[in-house]
Amino acid sequence: MSEQDKNIEKPFSPSLGREVRRIIIAGGGTGGHIFPAIAIANAIKQIEPGSEILFVGAKGKMEMEKVPQAGYNIEGIDIAGFNRSSLIKNIGLPIKLIKSFLQVRKIINDFKPDAVVGVGGYSSFPVLKHAQHKGIPTFIHESNSFAGKTNMLLGKNAFKIFVATDGMEKFFPKEKIEVTGNPVRKSIAQSTVTRSEALRYFNLEENKITVLAVGGSLGARSINEALSKNIDAFKIHNLQLIWQIGKTTAADYKEKAKSYLSVWADEFITQMEMAYAAADIVISRSGAMAVTELCVARKPVIFVPFPFAAEDHQTVNAQTLVDKKAALMIKDSEANEKLVAMAISLAENKSLQEELRQNISKLAVTNADEVIARKVLEAGR
């Protein structure tokens, strides 16, 4: 950091009796990165209300929409990930990377953060890399049991690395790791929404068992196809469905769902606390944040792991709960034929629902956001 930067006077908060913290939070791409980031930001603001927080994400990605909705400013940078399916599409990557570093340099020089937090996703790389170059303390949050490449590349020079589970020494320096669990949005962790209120929100009935199906923020083809193919079965068995379709081919599925009064379907559920409160049973992918939220929400769940996740970590995530009799699991390749039948079977088995509910609730962690926020705020004092 230059002498000029060091000598710039920072704003002072008389009520707190100390300097206001300026924090950059970088990363995104999916809800699994964005929502933990927002949870950390909210915890920082709760601990030190005068703190200034700026998000940095990739232009065109969902963080550019979701972060402002949460009440925070975000700067977009021109960066894209490596395309493994079409090498020719990677021709412009070096130019984008150079441009993103120039954009990041200006953002950091203008904002002058005391600390930078990376939550994963390729947009976090240039931000944390430049911060590390300038000697600004950087923190990483890794939500999965198998670390992402961006986080692994940045971990060596990070101040501290927050992880969800034990055994992450194979990815990061052992002395920098702190096991905190995954941050959960306070709207979910501290939800007081009743089942009745939630069902009214989705315009559904109280006297029917409700199945919530979520394939992640971008959708899940196997889950969507299984539900679409067998949607009549929900009506036959007097069940109702809350269906987060995701953005991929959403229009086709939404059109099909229109003719069913007991089905609510849309691209994205903006108030997940409502969905969890309404649900008696959940069908879900088993990304780290989905698993974390379902533990906190204490719901009987059928996991359909995404089979192409790095090192098949979604199957590992789901199997951990299955081994503890805290969830059920079905292979992605079997979902089309078996998923809806399994959901109906669970809906008719009250004792199994209660067993799953009791066991998954034992795995809930609700204060990871606060633990991380306090560590970040301590940086540079």
Image (cartoon, rainbow, N blue to C red):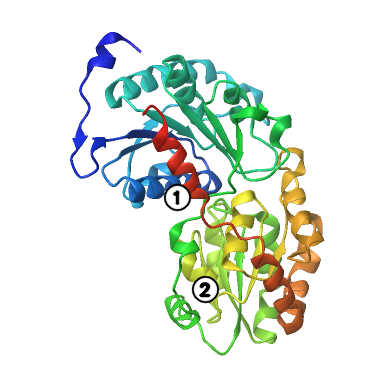
Badge 1, how many Cα within 10 Å: few under 14, some, many 20+? many
- Circle 1 residue: 39
Left or right of residue 272, residue 109 in this image: left
Looking at this view, is 250 or 104 the one in front? 104
Residue 122 coordinates in the image, percent (x, y): 54, 30
Q: Quadrant of the N terminus?
A: top left
Residue 266 coordinates in the image, percent (x, y): 50, 64
Residue type indicated by callout 1: Ala
353 up-or-down from 306: above or below: below
Number of the label disc, if any, that sits on residue 286? none
Residue 340 coordinates in the image, percent (x, y): 73, 72
Local secondary structure at mark 2: helix
Looking at this view, is 213 or 55 the one in front? 55
- Location of residue 17 (image quadrant): top left
Looking at this view, is 211 or 73 the one in front? 73
Q: CA distance from mark 2 to mark 1?
A: 19 Å
212 up-or-down from 366: above or below: below
Residue 59 visible in the shown view? no
Looking at this view, is 102 or 380 the one in front? 380
Residue 301 coordinates in the image, percent (x, y): 68, 67
Left or right of residue 110, residue 335 in this image: right
Badge 2, how many Cα within 10 Å: few under 14, some, many 20+? many
77 up-or-down from 367: above or below: above
Task: Tell me the mark number nearer the camera, choosing from 2 and 1.
Answer: 1
- Circle 2 residue: 277
Local secondary structure at mark 1: helix
